[in-house]
Image (tube, grey):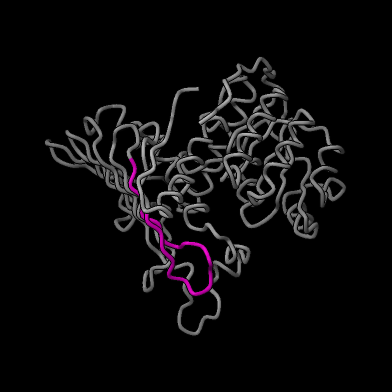
Amino acid sequence: MNIPQREVRSITYPASHVFRGALLGTGQISVYHLRAWSQIKGVEIVALANRTIEKALARADEFGISPDHVYSDHRELLEGEDLDFVDIATLPDVHRVQVEDAAAQGVNVLCQKPMAPSMEDAQAMVEACDHAGVLFSINENWRWRTWYRDLKRLVEEGAVGKPKYIRIVRHTNLTVPRPGESLPEFFKDQPYIMNMERLILYEWGIHLIDVMRFLFGEVNWVFARMDRTSPISIGEDRAYITMDVGGVNCLVDISWGSIGVEKRESQLEQVTLEGDQGSIELLPDEADMLRISNHEGSRTQPAFTGTSDDAYQASYTAAQAHFIGCLREGREPETAARDNIRTLGAMFASYESAAENNVIHLQNADS
C-alpha cells in the first residue's frame, strides 16, 4: 500500500485559541457531532452545510447557529467562512471532493468513516491534505468507547498474558420486516441504505476492523464470507470475517438480518479476548459488564458509567476532543487518515475475499 511519508506539522495554536469549525452534512448522525462539539472547550461550530438546506436550518436552530451561516453548498461555506476546520459527516461518495476543497482553502479536516468509496480516492485525499499542509483525520469513534480503551490498557498491562484470540459478535434484526411491517425503521430513517451495494461491513463492520487494529496492530490477512437475509436491501446484512491482526487470531461475526433477534439497547458487542494467561469478556446481556479471568479467579466491573446513551455520545466527544488536542499541539492523531487508510484497505480486502472465496494478504510496510 503506497502511503505518503509522514510530515511533521509545525503549526501550533495558543491555549486560548478558540477553533472555528463547520459541519458538512446534517443528517441523523450530525446531532451527535454537534453535541460533542458543544462539550469540548475552545471549539465553536459557526456554520453548517447540507444539500437539503431545510435540514441544515433545523439543526442550526437546534444548536443556536445563525441561519445566516447555513448553506446548501459546501463550496459556498468554505469561501464564505473563516474556519480552522471542517467536520465532514456526509456520505462517502462526496468525501473526496469535500476534503480536497477544504484542503485547497487551507482548512483542517475531520471526516466520517468510511474515508472513501475506493482506495484511489482515499490516496488522493491524503495527498491533497499533505500538499496543503492541513491535518486530515478520520472520525473513527468506536476505538474511543471506554470499554475498548480498557481492553487495550488491560492487554498492555499483561492481564491476559500474550493475546491469542479475540471474537466480536453482534446479531440483531434491522433489515428484515417484522410481521405487519412494510419497512423496518432502519430504512425509514436512512432510506439510501436500501440501495447500497456494500452494507453492513461498509457502514458498521469497518469500526470493528479498526478496533482490532487499535488493539493488536496491522492486518496481515483476511478471509471473509458475506450474505443477505433482507428482501429489501441489495447489500450484505451479514458478514463473517477472520483475520490475522498483529499475530492474533481475530473473528468479526455481525448480522443485521437475524430474524427473531430484537435490537438490544446495550452499546456493547459480545467480546471474548483470550491470552495464554487469562481472558477478558464484554457481556452486553449481563448488565454491560467487563469480566477479567485468570488462574487466580475472575472479577467483573461495569463497562461504562452512566446510561447507554451517555456512553454512545461519549465516544464521539472523546474522538473529536482528540482531534482538537492534536490540532492545537501539532501532533498526529491516532486516526490520522494516513493510518486509517489501512483500516479502509482491510475492509476492501474483506469484500475481495468474499467475492473470490479466498484469503487476501495485505502489505503493511511502515510509512
Q: Is residue 115 above or below residue 260?
A: above
- Residue farthest to the left, as pictured: 295
| Residue 107 appears left or right of 286 | right
Where residue 289 sits: x, y (%)?
Answer: 31, 49
Q: Is residue 312 magenta?
A: no
Q: Is residue 14 left or right of residue 288?
A: right
Residue placed most toward the observer, 354 or 68: 354
* Left or right relative to 240: residue 199: right
Q: Looking at this view, is 349 or 218 the one in front? A: 349
User: Image height check: is 55 above or below 159?
Assistant: below
Note whether 324 is above or below 352 in the view shown. Answer: above
Q: Residue furthest bottom?
A: 180
Residue 143 % position (x, y): 45, 39
Q: Position of residue 119 (x, y in %)?
A: 57, 40
Is 51 placed left or right of 280 in the picture? right
- Who is closer to the viewer here, 1 or 70? 1
Q: Residue at x 84, y 45 (%)?
A: 69
- Whether 234 is among the magenta residues is yes
Residue at 60% x, 33% y is 137
Residue at 52% of width from left, 53% of height from top? 203
At 82% across and 42% down in the image, what residue appears?
75
x, y (%) of residue 284?
A: 34, 55
In which quarter of the view is residue 294 placed?
top left
Q: Which region is colored magenta?
A: 225-243
The quadrant in which residue 193 appears is: bottom right
Total labels: the figure holds 0
